[in-house]
Amino acid sequence: MKMKKAEIYILSGFLGSGKTTLLKRLLEDEQKSSRKVAVMMNELGKVSIDSNAVDDDVSLKELLGGCICCSIQDKLEAQLQGLLVEERPDVIYIETTGAAHPVEVLDAILSPLFADKLMIKGIITLVDGTRWKDRKLLSPQLQQLIHEQVRHADFIIINKMDDLQEKEQAAISFEIQAINQTARCLLTNYSQVSIDQLRKLSVSFTKESQRIDLHLSTFVYQFKTAINHSRFEEFLKELPDTIYRIKGYIKFEQSAHPFLFQFSYGMPLYMKEDMNLPLNLVFIGENIQWNEIQVQLAGLEKTC
Ligand SMILES: Nc1nc2c(ncn2[C@@H]2O[C@H](COP(=O)(O)OP(=O)(O)OP(=O)(O)O)[C@@H](O)[C@H]2O)c(=O)[nH]1
């Protein structure tokens, strides 16, 4: 039986920006729906929320720990797979730590083993208004991080407006929209956003993706056959440099074994794999026309 795809929302934003506040709101909203909801926080994994556990703050807090992007990916992969198979949630909310970079988060949750069972709906970035106003006080690395969190978002919540004057609010909103012109941007207090507003986000997200996937997006291709290694290398060389990551299983005509393939910022890496796994290749990129990539990959499967 074909598994339905679980929706995934990634909650990003610097430390203290209001992610947990948002998560609680969303879980309250979800409680009114009949969807099966799961939450993942950091590398410590999963908690499946049944409707009457939503108010149980403790079960959420207990999971706070290290950072998804710095943690052991295998563990996260196993937990996410377990969650998908055992719990079969309709929707998964992933709260990242404030120190997580959006590309690394996508990378950590996307495994070629189950990427085709997930539907990544988007990255929701929370910005603490005052923190943004005073960001020059942060180290250059942290300034860069919050900039990247804004740049890669599909939906931006500028939070803690109650701490700011109207003039300051307008200035922040202007600055943020200059960095990311396509994300929906909302000024609010205490992360007041409804699940319906986020759902609207996903509709526009999907529409766009028919032409070109704005922001960060993911794509999965499944090879049916072994391919020619040198033609694959040629394909890699021609890729746009906004394809940040590729990983998956691949088989070459010349070799008896499949390979685990990793590609990070232009560097390919092949590792021999003993098992025959589905030949899924997972891509993460920014502003990519995936249909063009798909045509090129299909071309690699043709012998000529
Ligand atoms: N004044 C004010 N405080 C807020 C607002 N939204 C959230 N807070 C408070 O800010 C603090 C941090 O909020 P959280 O939701 O825990 O933020 P977080 O992003 O999950 O924080 P980390 O888990 O540390 O990354 C809490 O004490 C919230 O009650 C707001 O709009 N205005």
Image: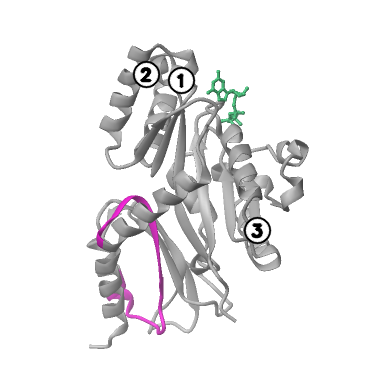
Label 3 element class? loop
| Labels 2 and 3 touching (C-beta < 8 A) | no
Which of the pair 238/220 is nearer the observer? 220
Whether residue 23 is situated above or below residue 117 in the rendered picture = above
Tell me if the residue at label 3 has its CB under 8 Å from ligand 1: no
The type of residue carrying mark 3 is: Lys
* Few, some or many residues within 10 Å of mark 1 (<14, 14–19, 20+): some
Q: Which residues are magenta?
A: 211-232
Q: Mark 2 — residue?
A: 169
Whichever of labels 1 and 3 marks the residue nearer the N terminus, that label is 3
Q: Position of residue 213 (x, y in %)?
A: 31, 55
Whether residue 228 appears in magenta in the rendering, the answer is yes
Whether residue 85 appears in magenta in the rendering, the answer is no
Whichever of labels 1 and 2 marks the residue nearer the N terminus, that label is 1
What is the quadrant of the C terminus in the image? bottom left
| Labels 1 and 2 touching (C-beta < 8 A) | yes
293 to the left or right of 84? left
80 to the left or right of 132? right
Q: Residue at position x 38%, y 16% from top?
A: 136
Q: How many marks?
A: 3
Disc number placed over residue 161 in the picture, else none: 1
Whether residue 114 is situated above or below residue 196 in the rendered picture = below
Measure the alpha-carbon separation of dots 1 and 3: 32 Å
The type of residue carrying mark 2 is: Gln
